[in-house]
Image (cartoon, grey):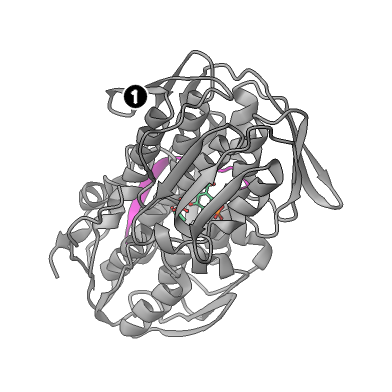
């Protein structure tokens, strides 16, 4: 929904030890894809553990507008009666993807090779984000797009009536771009090929295969080459959505920096395209046990036991950025509570998320007394040691859920409270955040 709710100021105060179990909600990336692939399949897809965050609810509404029957049967339990590849009807109204880059870009992909015309919009954050990264490769299929200057929403996309398959090397490491091209390739005859030089999250590839697409992935000198044969009949599936490692990052990082904490976070994805934060935290000296490794919903997962730790700053290699792209804001908070300097390189994609996350973190951390250095592609945090951040500031969240949650985690370990001007965007990805953190013992309240 693009109408931004009234701002909800929130404040976090230094807390006693966090203890207990944090059962984080379903993975946002997989939830979007379960609804989209369900809508493109023949038969009824059943989804359990769906994330009922606003981003995913907006994708559910969009799938209904294209003709799929999407119904909520119970908490996290949804069914999708699909229309099949090439079966999308033209929506009679604008598709509003709210705050969700994943939603709008993947949906543009899956309508781009059908003979329909669709107008997309989103909230004030999404309307600032670049769409040409998706509409450029879609134009190779024969799709046309007419947006505001700079390729911004609102944007009207005219699907190709006679699509041709494409071969496309992604110029930015983006799972959204890769996925949009693959989804468009579903309704183009012949082979669509996407080549990525830096691997990004691979949920689309795994799930497309699971729904019956003919897709194979090969690691070559040129990069990861993904080949999809167009016009398959996708078959409805049962999808058990695993928990979201990006949401798990908040209780995990909170426990690492709040003295004497000891928590359990079950079912955290160990998918190599998603687990960069956890590798980084261990390198910084985090006391994390990875117990009971197993598969859930087609993803490798483990139960994490996380204890308060004395951490040391490190240099995070640029090659790891894609596997932890949404976790840099909360890593910056952890880094501020570590000894020494943490250098995050290759992070310029953070500038085109829900907000410019490098700028938002730098300004908020500075306001809380932390020394920061930054350039276009780098963020450097000078750590103040465990519990050493002064705090005592109100940080601007810029309609960005991850910025809001990161600064609230910071406040739990800072000398003075840390407030955010608006915690309402948290509902886009982690509506249970406040209750879950309170149950662990975190002192987070509404108001400034
Ligand atoms: O494909 C996805 O589900 C996502 C891909 C990433 O974006 P980019 O592809 O723009 O890097 C990530 O930041 C986003 O939260 C979810
Ligand atoms: C970047 C994110 O999401 P999206 O691109 O889907 O808005 C995120 O959830 O951190």
Kindly identify the residue that appears in the image at 42 percent across and 24 percent down.
Answer: 67
Kindly identify the residue that appears in the image at 59 percent across and 43 percent down.
Answer: 180
Kindly identify the residue that appears in the image at 12 percent across and 65 percent down.
Answer: 447
- Seen from the viewer's position, the closer of residues 248 and 127 is 127
Q: Is residue 262 magenta?
A: yes
Q: Does residue 196 sit above or below 37 in this rendering?
A: below
Q: Residue furthest right?
A: 221
Q: How many marks?
A: 1
Mark 1 — residue?
Answer: 77
Q: Position of residue 206 (x, y in %)?
A: 62, 32
Q: Is residue 27 magenta?
A: no
Q: Does residue 417 sit above or below 253 in this rendering?
A: below
Q: Residue furthest left?
A: 447
The residue segment tinted magenta is: 260-273
Q: Does residue 277 sit above or below 232 in this rendering?
A: below
Q: Position of residue 429 (x, y in %)?
A: 36, 48
């Amino acid at each position: 929904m693009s109408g931004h709710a009234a701002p909800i100021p929130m404040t976090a105060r230094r807390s006693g030890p966090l203890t207990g179990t944090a059962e984080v909600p379903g993975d946002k990336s997989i939830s979007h894809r379960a609804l989209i692939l369900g809508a493109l399949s023949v038969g009824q897809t059943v989804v359990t553990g769906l994330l009922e965050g606003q981003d995913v609810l907006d994708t559910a509404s969009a799938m209904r507008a294209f003709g799929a029957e999407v119904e909520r049967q119970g908490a996290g339990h949804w069914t999708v009666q699909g229309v099949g590849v090439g079966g999308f009807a033209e929506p009679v109204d604008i598709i509003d993807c709210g705050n969700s880059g994943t939603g709008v870009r993947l949906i543009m992909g899956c309508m781009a090779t059908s003979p329909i015309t669709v107008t997309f919009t989103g909230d004030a954050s999404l309307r600032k984000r670049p769409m040409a990264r998706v509409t450029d490769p879609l134009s190779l299929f024969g799709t046309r797009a007419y947006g505001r200057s700079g390729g911004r929403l609102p944007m009207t996309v005219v699907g190709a009536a006679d699509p041709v398959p494409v071969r496309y090397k992604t110029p930015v490491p983006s799972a959204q771009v890769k996925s949009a091209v693959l989804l468009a390739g579903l309704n183009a005859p012949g082979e669509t090929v996407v080549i990525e030089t830096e691997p990004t999250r691979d949920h689309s590839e795994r799930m497309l295969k699971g729904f019956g697409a003919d897709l194979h992935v090969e690691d070559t000198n040129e990069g990861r080459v993904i080949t999809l044969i167009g016009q398959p009949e996708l078959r409805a599936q049962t999808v058990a959505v695993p928990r979201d490692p990006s949401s798990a990052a908040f209780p995990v990082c909170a426990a690492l920096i709040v003295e004497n904490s000891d928590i359990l976070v079950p079912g955290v994805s160990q998918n190599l395209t998603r687990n960069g934060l956890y590798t980084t935290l261990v390198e910084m000296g985090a006391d994390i046990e990875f117990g009971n490794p197993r598969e859930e919903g087609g993803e490798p997962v483990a139960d994490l036991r996380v204890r308060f730790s004395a951490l040391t700053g490190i240099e995070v290699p640029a090659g790891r950025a894609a596997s932890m792209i949404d976790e840099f804001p909360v890593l910056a908070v952890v880094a501020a509570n570590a000894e020494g300097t943490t250098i995050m390189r290759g992070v310029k994609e953070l500038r085109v998320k829900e907000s410019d996350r490098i700028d938002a973190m730098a300004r908020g951390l500075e306001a809380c007394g932390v020394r920061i250095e930054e350039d276009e592609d780098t963020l450097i945090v000078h750590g103040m040691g465990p519990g050493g951040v002064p705090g005592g500031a109100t940080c601007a969240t810029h309609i960005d859920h991850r910025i809001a949650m990161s600064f609230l985690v910071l406040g739990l370990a800072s000398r003075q409270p840390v407030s955010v001007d608006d915690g309402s965007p948290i509902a886009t990805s982690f509506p249970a955040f406040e209750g879950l953190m309170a149950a662990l013992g975190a002192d987070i309240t509404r108001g400034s």
